[in-house]
Amino acid sequence: MSRRCELTGVGPMVGHHVSHSNVKSKRRFLPALVPARLHSEALGQAFSLRITNAALRTIDFRGGLDAFLLRAPDDALSLRARKIKRQLKARQGAAAAA
């Protein structure tokens, strides 16, 4: 299982441990991933995604999963998130046509 946020694409970063004597050794900064169950109002179902804590706060700020996905670029989203976004767009197109 990859350590990558399914909504923002944030992954591990590389940096240094810096000792008191300023000796640097490599280390990895891992994202704070949490399994979250997010509800889509337009689709009427919940989805389980592994996302960062920052993405969870952003979803709340933007007004829910639907609003976040519609504004998110496709290259940052995982395959499952892209599938949800396609379903949202199809539902919006059907609602606009009716």
Image (tube, grey):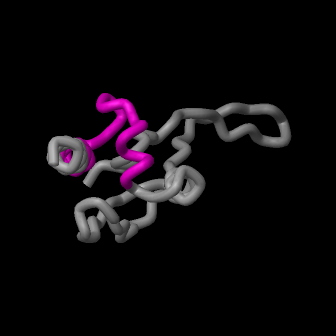
Nearer the observer, 56 or 35: 56
| Start-end of magenta stretch | 66-87
Residue 4 seen in the current view: no
Count of picture labels: 0
* Residue 65 screen position, x and y as percent: 40, 56
* Residue 61 screen position, x and y as percent: 59, 54
Nearer the observer, 43 or 49: 43
Q: Name the residue: 46% across, 58% down.
A: 64
Please name the predominant secondary structure of the magenta segment in the image. Answer: helix
Left or right: residue 50 compared with residue 96: right
* Residue 36 screen position, x and y as percent: 39, 68
Left or right: residue 58 compared with residue 72: right
Q: Name the residue: 33% across, 65% down.
A: 41
Residue 44 seen in the current view: yes
Rendered view: 34 above or below 25: below
State the quadrant of the N terminus.
Answer: bottom left
Q: Name the residue: 84% across, 36% down.
A: 21
Nearer the observer, 94 or 32: 94
Q: Is residue 23 magenta?
A: no
Q: Is residue 85 magenta?
A: yes
